[in-house]
DNA sequence: TGCCAGGCCCTCTTTAGGGCCTT
């Protein structure tokens, strides 16, 4: 197998774009990848204690009625902190999900020790010919079958996991490494774009 | 009252501006 590291790939649905501006998580979805296989899934709605906008209802398909029946953020995020444990994390445009994860966990006094990698940054370096770097575009670019609706947390995390595996496959096809550790992917995702092809050729 | 993100990346750049990506 080309990656023996276990990673948790996650996606939040939220009330808006900025936790600093008062926005909250309303759904968390995640898959655990072990040896390239999905070995765990997590999906829960959470009630942020306020109504969400009509825009968010239509964007996510998550209604105020659905959230009214959900457990509160603290209860759900505590379960999610147990799920991620000390594994490394991945999300598409991770700077967004990391802000919400940090904010929601800070509210309940929980932390995570792993590194947080971004599939969008890695795609910009490994799929430089892609037309753009939206999750849906990259999934189609990598010829990953689409069989659900984007903008729900578990589905988007499943698609991000498949994209992550497609990038692992792409990289393993371009180098001689038998196993590609998370640390290497993380390092490539932070490298200047121009230096990536030359670096990969040395592996 | 009125406002409302932020990190990355490119370029007509670095004493900056604007588009992308996430909800």
Image (cartoon, helix red, strand yellow):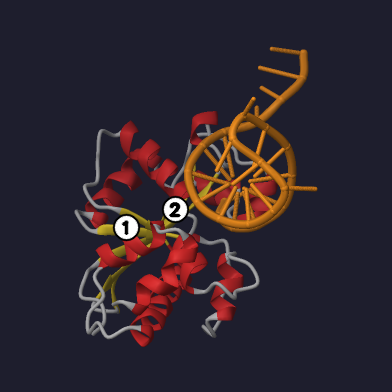
Q: Which residue is mark 2?
A: A94
Q: Badge 1 local density, few (<14 within 10 Å), some, or many (20+)?
A: many
Which of B5 and A81 lies nearest the eye of the viewer?
A: B5
Q: What distance separates the C-alpha of mark 2 from that of mark 1?
A: 9 Å
Which of A130 and A99 lies nearest the eye of the viewer?
A: A130
Badges 2 and 1: C-beta atoms under 8 Å apart? Answer: yes
The percent position of residue A165, horizontal first and vertical second, equals 38, 77
The percent position of residue A151, horizontal first and vertical second, equals 57, 61
Residue shown at 55% from the left, 30% from the top = A21
Q: Chain of mark 2?
A: A
Image quadrant of residue A132? bottom right
Q: Which mark is residue A89?
A: 1
The percent position of residue A174, horizontal first and vertical second, equals 38, 84
Residue A43 can be seen in this image: no
Quadrant of the snapshot with the C terminus of chain A: bottom left
Label 1: state its secondary structure: strand
Q: In the rendered view, would you say A38 is above or below A23?
A: below
User: Is residue A128 rendered to the left or right of residue A34?
Assistant: right
Label 2: state its secondary structure: helix
Q: In the rendered view, would you say A23 is above or below A11?
A: above
Q: In the rendered view, would you say A13 is above or below A124?
A: above
Quadrant of the snapshot with the N terminus of chain A: bottom left
Q: Are tags 2 and 1 found on a single chain?
A: yes
Residue shown at 44% from the left, 53% from the top = A94
The percent position of residue A6, horizontal first and vertical second, equals 23, 68
> Going from the N terminus, do you reach mark 2 or mark 1 first?
1
Q: Which mark is residue A69?
A: none
Q: In the rendered view, would you say A189 is above or below A53?
A: below
Image quadrant of residue A197? bottom left
């Amino acid at each position: 197998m080309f990656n023996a590291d276990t990673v948790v790939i996650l996606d939040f649905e939220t009330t808006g774009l900025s936790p600093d501006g008062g926005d909250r998580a309303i759904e968390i979805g995640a898959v655990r990848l072990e040896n390239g296989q999905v070995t765990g899934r997590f999906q829960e709605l959470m009630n942020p204690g306020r109504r969400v906008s009509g825009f968010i209802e239509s964007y996510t398909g998550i209604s105020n009625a659905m959230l009214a029946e959900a457990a509160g953020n603290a209860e759900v995020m505590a379960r999610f902190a147990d799920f991620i444990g000390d594994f490394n994390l991945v999300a598409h445009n991770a700077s967004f999900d990391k802000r919400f994860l940090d904010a929601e966990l800070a509210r309940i006094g929980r932390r995570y020790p792993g590194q947080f990698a971004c599939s969008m940054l890695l795609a910009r370096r490994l799929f430089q010919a892609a037309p753009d770097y939206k999750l849906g575009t990259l999934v189609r670019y990598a010829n990953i079958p689409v069989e659900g609706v984007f903008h729900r947390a578990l589905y988007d995390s499943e698609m991000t996991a498949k994209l992550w595996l497609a990038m692992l496959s792409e990289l393993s096809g371009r180098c001689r490494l038998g196993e590609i550790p998370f640390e290497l992917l993380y390092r490539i995702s932070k490298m200047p774009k121009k230096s990536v092809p030359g670096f990969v050729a040395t592996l």
